[in-house]
Image (tube, rainbow, N blue to C red):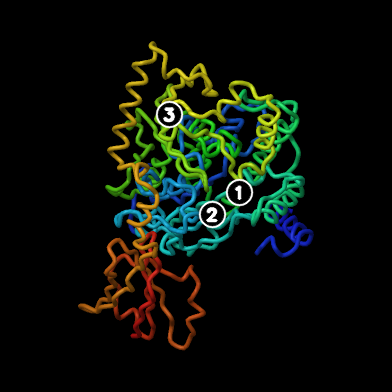
Amino acid sequence: MNLSARFVDAVRTAVYRIGASFFCCAAMVSAHGQNPPNIVLIVAEDLSPRVGAFGDTLAKTPNIDALADDGVRFTQVFSASGVCAPNRSALITGVYPQSLGTQHMRTTNRDYEAVPPAVVKAFPELLRRAGYATANTAKTDYQFGEPFTIWDVNEGNFVLPPDLAVWRKLPAGKPFFAMINLMSTHESRLATLETEGQGTFGSVIKALALVREATVSEVTDPADVSVPDYYPDTPQVRESIAQHYDNIHYMDEQVGEIVANLQADGLLNSTVVIWTTDHGDGLPRAKRAVYDTGLHVPLVLRWPDKTGAGQLDTRLVSVVDLAPSILQLAGIEVPAFVQGQAMLNTVVTRDYVFAGRDRMDAILDHVRAARDQRYKYIRNYQADLSYFRPLAFRDMFPVMQAIWQAKAAGTLTEQQGFYFTAPRPLEELYDTAIDPQELVNLASEPEHAQSLQRLRGAMDNWIRRVGDKGVIDESLMIEAMWPGGQQPSTQAPTIETRDQQLILTSATPGASIAYRLEAAGFGAELFGNREAWQLYTQPLDLQALSGATLVAKAVRYGYAESAESSASY
């Protein structure tokens, strides 16, 4: 029984036990000078470099290690936020969330979708424009809605197992890009059968714990884990960290199945495979934080011909560099709106990476971070507030519960109690080479004044350059995007004929347009699924539409979809 079958069987068992509430080509040239490759991007959730190939001797990750043996390991990759939704907006667009207005976690908690500038497009949509077929599994979470023009196939959800060969559902005859999101290491998978889910999370958390018990093997001894100094060293903490490693082992099996499916389909030698994670560990003081525990991620890139097999790339890389790098892989010009840089150009280097922390669910904050190869600089704009404050989702899980219990008992060390302290330092500076846990704040040390000033200046320049919206009150930002609290709507496409060509336009600046064809004699339901929508990129041959009805629809990111327009020929 393969992994997906094991997962589905476990889901059925869990559902039975807790009830139904559980479910309430254009000619292109690649970066290697060949025809455009297929590209598979595998994104695991909530995971720092706890991988054997990245030096973690406890991790049991033979499949990722084998992928790294055949590929290049990027060892200095950092997210733009320590939490998923803001960072996924950066990944999919190549633009910092602080610039897009997608920096708060989540926009939907305040009942809005962010509205990026009209020119901004998700890179898979740009791939579609250039002739690629695109597929996504399990998660979108972009903070500006789910524009139907991005993917040919977009399926799955947070709970069910992803299709580990989703490219098989794409139309033949095109190169493909498939993004496979692996939820198996997500923070929620740190639930145990004893975890009490809060509110609407209750039934889902219980179900996930049941499914995990049925699918994930215990391969990690809690006695062997390393407990960082900012956690109390208790059996509860050790068991949760060991559970995280067991989840990693299961996720590694999923990676192995993806690679095996590519091999079975005869595609491995024509496909670039990238494996990475969306941000750091799903543990307290990691997820939602701008310390390296929340930002530092592993990345492996395997070329079809195994170029650079086994090599390390130690350049600084930001998540915003992924979009332009994938466009570069496909031989597509990188648009001017992209703030990242293509990391596959070995000449290009970064001096700094940048990140931020803003509202987390109901908890307000405003933090910015800058890092070079050695030093981390953090600026706390709301230093009057402590870092740890009650946060419903995070507080369900064992490590944070152990921290709260130790605080109540008065047994936290000075280092552990720091995160409950208010006011916080206005500035923090860490030497990550000798202090990888970022525990010793050097901001007030005279011998580090030059590094402090340099990183402070780099951050100020970045804030100006990207137009950081963190200084804007979120309510004012929402009003600017959704006047009167109402989501703007995309204007329906206009259908025109000119010189035997059919031309589609929308009066909404930045709108993307798609269409589908309904053949004579067939109902719209036959063509009404999302996979049938074709991205409009150029005028259509009117003669080729004879006997068909064309249906068109448009969307600008963050806007409501337009009404449909149609015409028969």
Residue that mark 2 sits on: 139
Q: Earlier in the sequence, mark 2 or mark 3?
A: 2
Q: In this view, does 513 lie above or below 140?
A: below
Q: How far from the left and from the top, in percent, is residue 291?
A: 50, 30
Q: Of the residues under marks 1 and 2, which one precedes in the sequence?
A: 2
Nearest-to-viewer mark from 1 and 3: 3
- Corner quadrant of residue 406: top right
The location of residue 565, given as percent across then percent down, is 35, 78
How busy is the neighbourhood of tag 1: few (under 14 within 10 Å), some, or many (20 plus)? many
User: Splitting the image into 4 quarters, where does residue 191 fall?
Assistant: top right
Picture residue at 65% right of the left edge, 25% below the top = 412
Q: What amino acid is found at the position of numbered circle 2 in the picture?
A: Lys
Say which amino acid is labelled 3: Ile
Quadrant containing the C terminus in the rendered view:
bottom left
**In the displayed structure image, the side of residue 7 where residue 164 appears, left or right:** left
**Dots 1 and 2: beta carbons under 8 Å?**
yes
Describe the element under mark 3 as helix, strand or loop: strand
Residue 41 seen in this snapshot: yes
Q: How far apart are marks 1 and 2 (CA)?
A: 9 Å
Q: Mark 3 points at which residue?
A: 378
- Position of residue 466 relative to residue 521, above or below, is above
Q: How far apart are the two marked residues, 2 and 3, measured between alpha carbons?
A: 30 Å
Q: Quick one: SS at disc 1?
A: helix
What residue sits right under mark 1 in the picture?
Answer: 183
Up-down: is 445 above or below 542? above
Q: Is mark 2 on a helix, strand or loop?
A: loop
Tell me residue 262's x, y (percent). 56, 50
